[in-house]
Image (tube, rainbow, N blue to C red):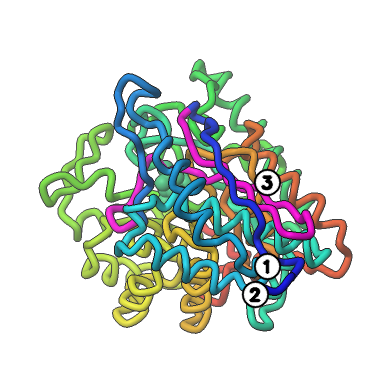
Amino acid sequence: MTYKASRIARVHARQILDSRGRPTVEAEVELVDGSFGRSCVPSGASTGRHEAIELRDHNTSQYDGLGVGQAVNNVRSEIADRLLGEDALDQRQIDRLLISLDGSANLSRLGANAVLATSMAVCRAAAVHSHNPLYRYINSLCRGRPMSLPLPMVNILSGGAHAGRGMDLQDFLAIPVGASSYSEALEMISRVRVSATRLLADRGYSVLLADEGGLSPGFKHAHEALDLMVQSFEAAGLVPGQDMAIAIDVAASELFVNGRYELVRHGFQFSGEEMASFITECVRRYPIISVEDALEQDDWLNWQTFTASVPGVQVIGDDLFVTNQKRITMGIECSAANGVLIKVNQNGTLSGTLDAMETAWRAGYTTVVSARSGETEDTFIADLAVGTGAGQIKIGSVRSSERLAKYNQLLRIEEDQSLEFIGAAGLGRNTRQNVACN
Ligand code: 2PG
Ligand code: MG
């Protein structure tokens, strides 16, 4: 083999703990010239049935069965053996090799956690080798796509699997549509988060943190949470719908039991049609401009009906699309949505994630790069959102270091004067921008 400075010289991995204190995989890659990359994988709680599979040890005597020792060993042995000597600058080839080495349809043999940690660590090492900040290097893998600083959608109130099911809907988020820079967006969000805390504390609710740093007041009805959102905007001196709008992540797959949507806290049992009209009604009443997973992950027909019934609203598939090119293509063909949530660990490789994004953009779908509810200090997705010009990012609330690491990385990246803050334009042409709703 000829000497090449960008060839992979060392691959290593270890088990670390994520923001929920659960084991996850951290991988390290070193190149011949000493360039070094490290990356850790996140983990979801409300996971989609069609996601790539993270490998867990299921040894109940350790970490409640959630250890990732096998995945770590797979990186240290099989993956390292296969990648040693390969060129880190050829991310596509690296990811192809990882997928074929795994050999399964969903990365279940080696583990999507083992594969993704390696894929991202290779990318980081290659960025170092090429003397580029990570976001610029990622952009070089994106065939001419313009970079931009994303519009954040930020968790304020949490329910579902992230907050002991205290509320049926999983996330109530704020989108600073009136912001003219990323740092202004962050400050506006921070003000709303403070207002929400004060309003809840004044009314005697707990202000302890849920898994993503959001508040979890445990309201019975979604309207109570939406009222609180609007009141928090106003208390922060912001005009609802104009400065700050609402997004919701229903995470409806979590509510789907035996063919019905069970909203236990509301006391409702809905058919798909009823579920779609319940959310449509929320959209009519409140300044909601983005709705994620209003329906279950395989309920394609009701997705279509719902998307058609909320014109001008961003309709995002998370569990529906699982950052999978094939499922996104299916959705595009039947107009099931108009936006895609992008989670690297649902896909399992960086190249596969970039392909999923490109498929979405070609159809005019918006993309929202997203963290998981179980996160680490890794800031990869901040650079990913900028480098791909994704348009939007969802990281959780502005609390807890695993979230703030990413918000703060975007502040650092913002110092690159050549980058434009995409603002409300990141919502694409589908959404009712800067429209005051009542
Ligand atoms: C989601 C994510 C992040 P999880 O549903 O969008 O909020 O949750 O990582 O638990 O799937
Ligand atoms: Mg979701």
Q: Nearer the viewer, mark 1 or mark 3?
A: 1
- Which residue shows up at 78% across the image and 63% down it? 129
Badge number at residue 138:
1
Q: Nearer the viewer, residue 88 or 227?
A: 88
Question: What whole-number distance in Å separates the C-alpha atoms at marks 1 and 3?
Answer: 16 Å
- Under mark 2, the amino acid is Leu
Cα gap from disc 2 to disc 1, whole angstroms: 5 Å
Q: What secondary structure is marked by label 1? A: helix
Which of the labelled discs sits on residue 406, or is there none?
3
Secondary element type, mark 2:
loop
**C-beta proximity under 8 Å, tags 2 and 1:** yes
Nearer-the-camera pick, 150 or 348: 348
Which of the two labelled residues, at mark 1 and mark 3, occupies the earlier sequence position?
A: 1
Residue 68 sits inside the magenta stretch: no
Instruction: Name above or below for residue 268 compared with residue 9.
Output: above
Q: Give the label, 3 or 2, closer to the camera.
A: 2
The answer to whether the beta carbon of the residue marked 2 is less than 8 Å from any atom of ligand 1 is: no
Q: Can residue 432 be seen from the camera position used here?
A: yes
* Three-letter residue code for mark 3: Lys
- Percent of width and height locating residue 294: 33, 56
Residue placed at 50% from the left, 74% from the top? 355
Picture quadrant of residue 298: bottom left
User: Does residue 159 appear to the left or right of 127 in the view shown?
Assistant: left
Label 2, on which residue? 141
